[in-house]
Amino acid sequence: MARRRGVLAALLVLTLAQSVRAQIDLLTYREAEKVIEALPDISADRREGYCPMLSNRGYGGYGGDSPHQLSFTVRNGCGPTAGQLVENYVIDRRTGTVTLWGDNPEVVGDAESRARAERLIRQARSRALSANEAKCLALEAAKSLPGWTSPGHLTIDAESNSEQNRLSFGVAFRSSIRPIDFGLDLDVDLGSGRVRDDQTGQDLWSAGVGRLTSEIFALREPDVLTNEEALTLVLALKIPAFEMEINRGCRLRAPVLPFRSDEAEVGLACDDRSDENANPVIVNVETGRTIDEATGQVLGSEDSHRVAEGLFEAKRRARFEIRNKIEAACGLKQ
């Protein structure tokens, strides 16, 4: 049993370590989509009614020559050219630069799309950890080291720049039960929250570090609906065509197709027949607005509006609670 607990603890730390390797100061998937949508060719196609749709995982994704790149395939989504390829793009999540996919990448974009990219890049960079947050992570990492939890006094000196986008901290421990002092130098990556021991070059991971990093990252999550929340909202609409098919064993699913950065498309999934009896519903994940895809009619009811307000209020409340937890743990003022 003890061995099993040890294995489970190791797996927990490994899982936490993998989960917090996200880079919060780079463009997210949705932000990258917004840059692609602003490209001249894509904007022109939308004005002309061709419904350009960006691939989402199926045809595009994280790729290219760098982990900081995302690749997208854009196809027309409606009209006589539905399904036709528009272009393949690669975007650098660190700079917002968009190139055509291929052996000889060509930079594309105009003043408007570049301005949007610059604005989103500034927004992404503003998500980097503050000096106080980095200091708190360094202290939490030190507490997990052997010997650092015994009775004594732990101190940390003022931060200094060690490398680009990293802060370095000197952490010291004075034992209260033995006449010894010891310390080490740690640095924190402000974009990922990873804490590194400068002496060994190894990242320091623990349940506490993983939990604190996840909470700090959660404060930076945008208030947008997840696929599950979009489904919950559409259920609250009680659309007769959907209700009839659900009673016959069908289920709502999202996303149905690749769509736009601020929208999710919700449709039906039926195991034994087609789902052509009900038009998909477009959900604006930033506002909760719902629209019948085929007619363009805005959908809504008292129940659905109440559900949408509740979903966004829950996100704001969760953010407030997380902020209080971090302030209590680190003495931070957000």
Image (cartoon, rainbow, N blue to C red):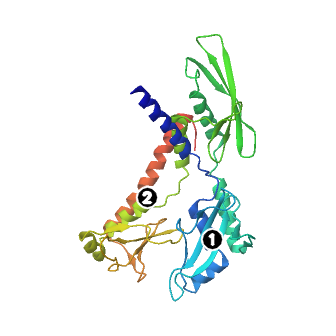
Residue denoted by label 2: 312
Position of the N terminus, as image quadrant, is top left
Look at the picture and state if 120 lies above or below 23. Answer: below
- For the residues marked 1 and 2, what is the alpha-carbon distance in whole angstroms? 27 Å
Nearer to the camera, 123 or 189: 189
**Secondary structure beneath disc 2?**
helix
Q: Any mark on residue 306, and which?
A: none
- Identify whether 114 is placed above or below 65: below
Q: Which structural element holds mark 1?
A: helix
Specify the amino acid type for callout 2.
Phe
Where is residue 161? Give x, y as percent: 75, 40
What label does residue 36 carry, if any?
1
The residue sitting at 57% across, 32% down in the picture is 140
- Quarter of the image for residue 297 reads bottom left
Please tell me which residue is depicted at 39% across the width and 63% down the height of the picture: 308
- Residue 215: horizontal and vertical position, in percent? 52, 44
Q: Judge depth for marks 1 and 2 and give the one in front.
A: 1
Q: Is residue 244 above or below residue 143?
A: below
Determine whether, in the image, residue 206 is placed left or right of residue 306.
Answer: right
Q: Residue 252: percent from the left, percent from the top?
A: 35, 67
Question: Which amino acid type corresponds to the residue marked 1 in the rendered image?
Answer: Ile
Q: Is residue 291 left or right of residue 140?
A: left
What residue is drawn where x is 32% and y is 80%? 277
Question: In the rendering, at what x and y percent does residue 309 appear?
Answer: 40, 61
Judge from the rendering whether residue 238 lies leftward or rightward of residue 77; answer left or right: left
Point out the image quarter for the C terminus: top right
Name the residue: 71% across, 42% down. Answer: 166
* Number of numbered discs visible in the structure rendering: 2
Q: Is disc 2 surrounded by few (<14), some (14 to 19) or many (20+) residues within 10 Å?
A: some
User: Which circle's residue, 1 or 2, is located before the other in the chain?
Assistant: 1
Q: Residues within 10 Å of mark 1 (few under 14, many from 20)?
A: many
